[in-house]
């Protein structure tokens, strides 16, 4: 598989990553799975998912804090019962630490921060996107060289083929 990616700055705190997935014949195709990881200039992963206990409730737009690590992140969603999507992460999440948001959500993490899923752009075959938001009403993204990795998986089990595509972008003065 071939991956082409584009980064577009939506505003001072948001970047859009678009991945075009093509077969070796050059046709757009849908992979089995596609994820993205974004790192700031200090090599801290800034977005992804952490596992949480299924009974915990969290509110999108609130900030969650790790009791042990002190890591923080903006809650984007709780896409399923045991997963919390975070962006604008500071610090490094630990597995098994208590987390709490600025409202009423409290939980114990069941995993450290893992890659985020890219979503299909409309119904277009082979076109995926991911918005990275530092958070509404915050200062611009940190200056420096940001980097990321789009990882495409085709197939399942032992026959899975992984195709990584590294990308970077610079946030200047």
Image (cartoon, helix red, strand yellow):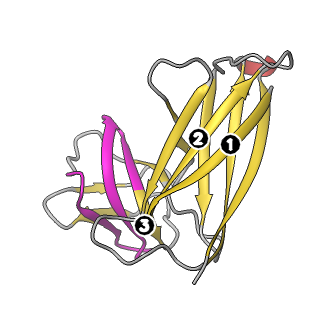
Depth order, front residue of 173/112: 173
Name the residue that disc number 3 marks: 13
Judged left or right of residue 54, residue 115 is right
Badge 1 crowding class, 10 Å Cα cut-off, few under 14, some 14 to 19, many 20 or more, is some
Badge 3 crowding class, 10 Å Cα cut-off, few under 14, some 14 to 19, many 20 or more, is some
Name the residue that disc number 2 marks: 18
Judged left or right of residue 163, residue 110 is left
Cα separation between marks 3 and 2: 17 Å
Q: Residue 162: percent from the left, percent from the top?
A: 78, 32
Give the residue drawn at x 62%, y 32%. 34
Helix or strand or loop: what does disc 1 sit on?
Answer: strand
Q: Are marks 1 and 2 in contact (CB under 8 Å)?
A: yes
Work out whether 93 lies above or below 120. below
Name the quadrant containing residue 33: top right
Q: Which residues are magenta?
A: 59-86
Cα separation between marks 3 and 1: 19 Å
Helix or strand or loop: what does disc 2 sit on?
Answer: strand
Name the residue that disc number 1 marks: 5
Q: Residue 99: percent from the left, percent from the top?
A: 32, 63
- Residue 101 lies in magenta, yes or no? no
Q: Residue 55: percent from the left, percent from the top?
A: 22, 41
Cα separation between marks 1 and 2: 5 Å
Badge 2 crowding class, 10 Å Cα cut-off, few under 14, some 14 to 19, many 20 or more, is many
Q: Residue furthest bottom?
A: 173
Depth order, front residue of 50/133: 133
Earlier residue among tags 3 and 1: 1
Q: Are marks 3 and 2 in contact (CB under 8 Å)?
A: no
Q: Which mark is residue 111?
A: none
Q: Main secondary structure of the magenta part?
A: strand
């Amino acid at each position: 598989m071939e991956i082409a990616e584009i980064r577009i700055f939506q505003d001072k705190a948001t970047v859009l990553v678009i991945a075009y997935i093509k077969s070796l014949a050059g046709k757009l195709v849908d992979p089995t799975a596609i994820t993205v990881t974004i790192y700031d200039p200090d090599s801290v992963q800034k977005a992804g998912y952490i596992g949480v206990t299924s009974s915990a409730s969290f509110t999108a737009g609130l900030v969650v804090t790790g009791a042990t690590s002190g890591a923080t992140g903006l809650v984007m969603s709780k896409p399923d019962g045991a997963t919390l999507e975070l962006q604008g992460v500071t610090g490094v999440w630990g597995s098994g630490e208590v987390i709490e948001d600025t409202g009423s959500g409290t939980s114990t993490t069941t995993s450290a921060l893992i890659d985020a899923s890219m979503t299909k752009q409309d119904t277009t075959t082979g076109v995926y996107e991911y918005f990275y938001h530092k958070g509404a009403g915050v200062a611009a993204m940190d200056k420096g060289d940001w980097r990321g990795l789009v990882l495409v998986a085709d197939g399942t089990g032992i026959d899975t083929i992984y195709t990584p595509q590294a990308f970077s972008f610079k946030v200047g003065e």
